[in-house]
Amino acid sequence: MQIQRIDHVHLEVSDREAAAEWYGRVLGLIRSKELAPWADDPMGPLVLAAPDGTPLLSLFARPAKPTSRDATIAYRTSAADFKAFLASLPRELKNTRGKTLTAQDVVDHDLSHSIYFLDPDENRIELTCYELDALK
């Protein structure tokens, strides 16, 4: 067997609708039309996709639990999109220390640059970019 790629990630949220709105506004994710029937079940997933329709997140309504550093979802982005995100940071975004997210929160990993922040349920999100020359 050869794995092709990660299909999607399960994410527990306190309110699927509110989370879907947040991920749409902050990351541009959209509801998957193809997998929408699953959201009819209150215990089923509300699936969010990239604009090209590729499923990314399955939102499950569950009571909130503490998160850990190991529970981070990383999204790769282009240098242009990374710069645009930094230039228009929503004031509501919090870094992993609970403070307002700023461009100073970018972490230089030598081979990539990343910025880490929390969703409303305190799930950890990472945006990462490997196009270092274009970030200069």
Image (cartoon, rainbow, N blue to C red):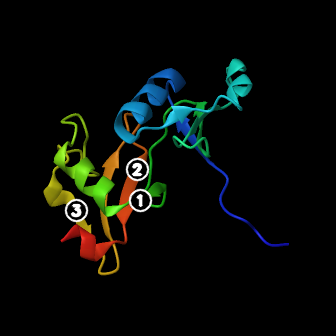
Residue 20, given in percent of the width and then of the height, sits at 49, 29
Q: Which one is in front, 37 or 34?
A: 34
User: Marks 1 and 2: in contact by CB < 8 Å?
Assistant: yes
Query: Mark 1 Cα within 10 Å, few/some/many (few <14, many 20+)?
Result: few
Identify the residue under disc 1. 69
Identify the residue under disc 3. 106
Does 104 sit left or right of 19 as displayed? left
Identify the residue under disc 2. 124
Above or below 107: residue 46: above
Residue 128, given in percent of the width and then of the height, sits at 37, 62
- The residue under the point 72% across, 20% down is 41
User: Marks 2 and 3: in contact by CB < 8 Å?
Assistant: no
- C-alpha gap between disc 2 and disc 1: 7 Å
Does 84 sit left or right of 3 as displayed? left
* Element at label 2: strand
Q: Earlier in the sequence, mark 3 or mark 2?
A: 3
Q: Nearer the viewer, mark 3 or mark 2?
A: 3
- C-alpha gap between disc 3 and disc 2: 14 Å
- The residue under the point 67% across, 20% down is 42
One can see residue 130 in this view: yes
Q: Residue furthest bottom?
A: 110
One can see residue 108 in this view: no
Residue type for callout 3:
Val
Q: Nearer the viewer, mark 3 or mark 1?
A: 3
Q: Which one is in front, 44 or 131?
A: 131
Residue type for callout 2:
Arg
